[in-house]
Amino acid sequence: MTTIDMNCDMGESFGVYKMGADEEILPYISSANIACGFHAGDPSTMRKTVRLAIENGAAIGAHPGLPDLMGFGRRHIDLLPEEAYDIVAYQVGALWGIVQSEGGRMRHVKAHGMLYNRATKEPELSEAIARAVYDIDPELILFGLAGGELLKAGKNMGLKTGSEVFADRTYQEDGTLTSRREANALIEDADQAANQVIRMIGEQKVRSQQGKDVDIHAETVCIHGDGAYALDFAKNVREKVENAGVQIQAIGG
């Protein structure tokens, strides 16, 4: 049977500010990417989200981002490769400690926001991120955009990788995601999102904003937890994917 991982970015509340519907979404996903305090999240939120993931049987991953709480990690910040290594190691290490203290196991790492997008295109940045992950635990799985530099760096480093596609984002003809600054970057119709996912799994194709089909390899599908329709998307995508004969399962699970 064909399998696919369904992941969601979580633990993005901070102090008294609440974001996302983590508790409601967790039953519908197989992997949770937990913010580590730089772009979102805080120690208490991290621990709470780890506990929820364990209770729901979701694979736990670190979601390191740029040090940019105000901009939610989506603004450009210049980073030297060694700085990228340090911020990734710092954040992954922090979540790793909480996971261990809760009796869980960290399974994967997925960069967030601008760090993720830049690593898709920048080999030196990708290598620094992959090296940080490998040095912490070579058994961790590195998620990256399908066809991007981060996956190449992970494989070159000897890491297992997860080729990621997006249910709620549109694509450009070079296989990258449409910038959030563009009006058509987000898919807000749950049926459209589910149909895009099913095609990416079954046909390994996605229709770009330029009207061309792009080859794509889907191993894990992202649903953004901060989206206005995140819970509806998670329910609808899971139902339609399973009805298409695809099993939802964490990578390596």
Image: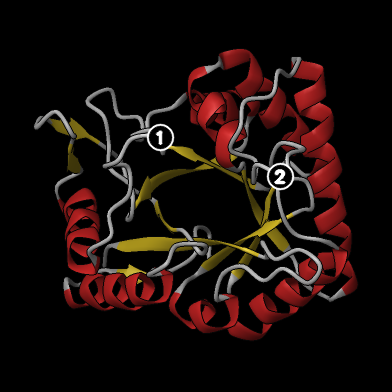
The spot of residue 31 in percent (x, y) is 54, 65
Judge left or right: residue 94 versus residue 186: right
The residue at the point 67 percent across, 71 percent down is: 18
The residue at the point 73 percent across, 28 percent down is: 131
CA neighbours of label 2 inside 10 A, class few (<14), some (14 to 19), many (20+): few
Residue 57 in view here: no
Amino acid type of the residue that numbered disc 2 sits on in the rendered structure: Met
Judge left or right: residue 110 versus residue 227: right
Callout 2: SS: loop
Question: Camera-side residue: 159 or 80?
Answer: 80
Residue 70 is marked as 2
Question: Where, by quadrant of the figure, is residue 241 drawn?
Answer: bottom left
Residue 149 in view here: yes
The residue at the point 32 percent across, 49 percent down is: 186
- Residue ranking furthest to the left: 211
Q: In which quadrant of the rendered image does the N terminus lie?
A: bottom left
Label 1, on which residue?
181
Question: Camera-side residue: 207 or 186?
Answer: 186
Cα–Cα span, label 2 and label 1: 17 Å
Amino acid type of the residue that numbered disc 1 sits on in the rendered structure: Arg
